[in-house]
Image: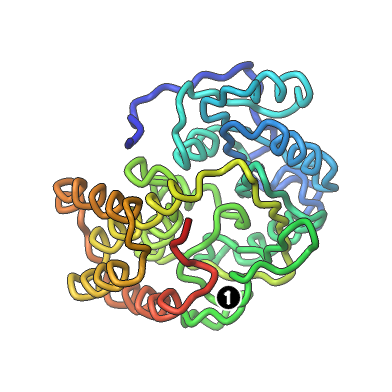
């Protein structure tokens, strides 16, 4: 169900992330006051508390904003009790990725690092990310995406190879391989770029929501880059519904294609998905939900310019053979 964008948000206490709108006087090496970490959560109290503990131990001491998407497991109460320094937002319903929008509107730092309730940043990575964005403040670098390490065990996530070997061609000044999209749980973005593009779509809710935002930023001239010197850790939660994630992932991919890509490219992607997704009720539901959204998709369709479509076309070739982005579950 698409959340109502008019939903008001309620804070459990009037505590907002401190820090000026410009980098802190500690300078480019300090990291203090430059980046706020935003976490969305739903019914993962213990995992969230672990993440908040690890974030609280970071040398950068970043302000943290948690958006509790209507958890029923005592998450909000536990955060308020055990982490009183964290800004806690309770919108009263599950807003999915749109919960991040609520948080970003409140932060006062120039950069925002997204984080899931089952992921966290490695010490020093937020400082290095802020240093990179500071260094390229006069260039249209919207954000930098980190290397992802899967816990327990510390193995590299399969998606990292795709980031490192990105087929997207970018300008020479980028600090790493150009990316056509980003991974929210492992990316630090410019706050002003995120807000100017409108943040994550209320329509998509959750599941591949980054692709639409990244594309809209690309249309505005922004770039994303992979930065191997940054690391985010991910301990995939067992408290997830893989089938629902697949439904949303397939549906949102279809919506994105028909919202932004030329008809030929959108049709080819649609046919490829129809041939390759599991033939079951979940896939049928995903295509049904996508079709039900056709009226608003037609109203809001804005085909990207050729230079942005070239990036999407390059990514499509990788996505068709990717082992890290399969629609299963």
Query: Is residue 162 rendered to the left or right of residue 308?
Result: right
Which residue sits at x=65%, y=41%?
117
Q: Nearer the viewer, residue 1 or 301?
A: 1
- The relative height of residue 93 versus residue 126 in the rendered view (above or below) is above
Which residue sits at x=56%, y=76%?
162
Q: Position of residue 305 (x, y in %)?
A: 27, 71
The picture quadrant where one finds residue 123 is bottom right
Q: Position of residue 229 (x, y in %)?
A: 74, 69
Q: Position of residue 187 (x, y in %)?
A: 60, 57
Which residue sits at x=70%, y=72%?
228
Q: Secondary structure at mark 1?
A: loop
Query: Is residue 55 rendered to the left or right of residue 16?
Result: right
Residue furthest out toward the front: 280
Indicate the quadrant containing the N terminus: top left, top right, bottom left or bottom right. Answer: top left
Q: Nearer the viewer, residue 216 or 258?
A: 258
Q: Position of residue 52 (x, y in %)?
A: 75, 37
- The relative height of residue 140 versus residue 178 in the rendered view (above or below) is above
User: Where is mark 1, residue-wise?
Assistant: 174
């Amino acid at each position: 169900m698409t959340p109502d964008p008019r939903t008001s948000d309620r804070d459990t206490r009037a505590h907002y992330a401190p820090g000026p709108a410009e980098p802190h006087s500690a300078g480019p090496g300090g990291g203090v006051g430059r980046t706020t970490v935003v976490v969305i959560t739903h019914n993962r109290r213990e995992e969230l508390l672990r993440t908040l503990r690890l974030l609280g131990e970071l040398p950068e001491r970043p302000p943290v904003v948690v958006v509790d998407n209507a958890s029923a497991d005592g998450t909000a109460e536990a955060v308020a009790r055990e982490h009183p320094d964290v800004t806690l937002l309770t919108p009263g319903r599950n807003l999915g990725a749109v919960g991040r929008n609520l948080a970003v509107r409140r932060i006062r730092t120039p950069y925002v690092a997204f984080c899931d309730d089952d992921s966290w940043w490695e010490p020093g990575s937020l400082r290095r990310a802020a240093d990179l964005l500071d260094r390229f403040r006069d260039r249209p670098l919207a954000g930098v995406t980190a290397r992802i390490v899967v816990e327990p065990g510390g193995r590299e996530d399969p998606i990292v190879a795709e980031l490192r070997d990105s087929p997207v061609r970018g300008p020479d000044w980028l600090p790493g391989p150009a990316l056509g999209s980003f991974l929210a749980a492992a990316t630090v973005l410019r706050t002003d770029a995120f807000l100017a593009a409108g943040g994550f779509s209320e329509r998509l809710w959750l599941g591949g929501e980054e692709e639409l935002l990244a594309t809209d930023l690309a249309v505005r001239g922004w770039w994303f880059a992979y930065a191997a010197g940054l690391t985010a850790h991910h301990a995939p939660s067992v408290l997830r519904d893989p089938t629902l994630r697949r439904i949303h992932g397939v549906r949102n991919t279809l919506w994105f294609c028909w919202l932004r890509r030329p008809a030929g490219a959108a049709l080819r992607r649609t046919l490829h998905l129809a041939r390759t997704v599991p033939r079951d009720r979940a896939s049928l539901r995903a295509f049904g939900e996508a079709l039900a959204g056709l009226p608003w998709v037609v109203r809001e369709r804005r085909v990207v310019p050729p230079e942005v479509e070239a990036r999407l076309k390059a990514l499509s070739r990788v996505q068709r053979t990717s082992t890290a982005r399969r629609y299963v579950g």
